[in-house]
Image (cartoon, grey):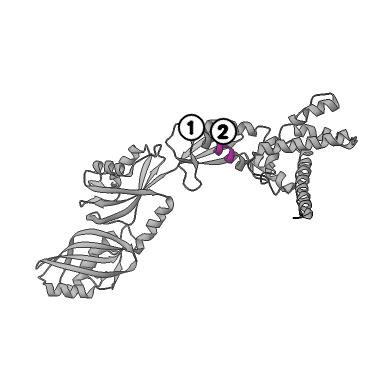
Amino acid sequence: MMRDVSRDVDKTHYRNEISNYILAKARELLLLYPLCNNCLGRMFALLGRGLRNYERGQSIKILLSMELSRSIREGDKESIELFRRLAPNIGEIASTLYRELFGEDLKREECFICGSSFEDIINLASRRAVSILEKMDLRSFLIAAKIDQAIRFREDELKRKHKLIFAESIGSELKREVSKRIQKELGLKPDFEQPDIIVEITIPTATVKTHLMPLFLKGLYWKLNRRISQSLWVSRRGIRRYPFSVEEALFILSRIFDSHTSILHASGREDVDARMLGTGRPFIVELKSPSKRSFDMSILSKKVNEYSRNLVKILFTNTASRRDIRIIKEEVGRHTKLYKALITTSSSINEDILSRLEEFYRGREIRQRTPRRVRHRRRDIIRYRIVYSIATRLITDRLFESLIHADAGLYVKELVDGDDGDTTPSFSDLLGVEAKCIELDVVGVLQLK
């Protein structure tokens, strides 16, 4: 088989073009600016794989010095003058040839961008970061760079003026290099979406600050008793309104995880005097700045339940993210719920009347104004909700139980009594007698509509 010589020639020409581009650009830069190995190499960071910018810059300077040395040996006097101008900006690599040519030691210039300190910054910041993180309970991290404006401006202007399309930023290099050291020495993994901690490094001081990120735990809760609020409810005088809350059941997590505080994000809420039974209510608890992050879900659930003394039951199911909080909040309006209500009437009723009630509330739309009892803290609007079905059980001639399947957001107590005409059609309307809900339980948060 004959070898395609033209293809080899094309490849050689292409490689020469790349090589010429790098050397030409490097010469153009070093005639104007002293650049350390890191800062020169960073101007060509997208060329080549598996190299540090320090190695790129060092290699380019060596090759440039060798090329000038060749020209000088061949008698090119212009190359001698060019080398004299370039050598202070190249630095140590050019010092031996400079001494041979000019009989004096080379006076090196500090790097135009970083002041010849960037490699030291990487090493110092890495040591400081490792020293801090090795004492903490972490699985993942993310590096952030805070760069002095003057340094950023000098680098950006240099890249813009010389059209350096293969360059990266000093911040990107710092983040990558420190990240590699942390991975190697501590075995932690970088996480760009939900890290356990953000390590902020300042250039040029190599100052290291850490920001512990929240820990999110997903679960279900059950309120097993009445007069338990979802959130801790304290009056302006510091008097608590109710003996316990779901939020307080989770307070122990702050102690377990050494967290500043915990915040409860729930998929809706039930009345204080309503129990949450059946399938439980989905929630996410957000733990602020936890220094401990290792846990077992079952043990965690057990500890919280022991702390809540059977007033509230908690089951943790998984870890979560801030995006999951938004999702459970948005899902509230698309859930349907199953309620169990114990209802009294002002006059006697019978099973025939209840049968007609069941027949009427099959896919029935309810017009409901914000109830009077919550109008002081909720927007006064008209809302429409669907009652999909009800089932009833007569207990006495003035007491019955009803299982109500309806849209989330329906005020069930007002569905029963009518709230002086603000909710229609109500049970009172259909029964022809005054009806009142005396006990209410949520027994199911059901699938999305």
Q: Amino acid at mark 2?
A: Ala
Q: Which comes before the other along the chain, label 1 or label 2?
A: 2
Residue 176 colored in magenta in the image? yes
Q: Residue at x 24, y 46 (%)?
A: 244
Q: Position of residue 288 (x, y in %)?
A: 40, 42
User: Does the magenta stretch mainly form a helix, a strand or a loop?
Assistant: helix
In this rendering, position of residue 22 left or right of residue 274? right
Q: Position of residue 269 (x, y in %)?
A: 30, 56
In this rendering, position of residue 242 left or right of residue 216? left
Q: How many marks?
A: 2
Q: Is residue 350 above or below residue 166?
A: below
Q: Position of residue 226 (x, y in %)?
A: 20, 52
Front in this rendered view, residue 167 or 73: 73
The magenta stretch spans which residues? 175-180
Q: Position of residue 238 (x, y in %)?
A: 28, 43
Quadrant in the rendering for residue 386: bottom left
Report which residue position mark 2 lands on.
Answer: 125
Q: Residue at x 33, y 68 (%)?
A: 382
Quarter holding the N terminus?
Answer: bottom right
Mark 2 element type:
helix
Report which residue position mark 1 lands on.
Answer: 132
Q: Residue at x 49, y 34 (%)?
A: 186
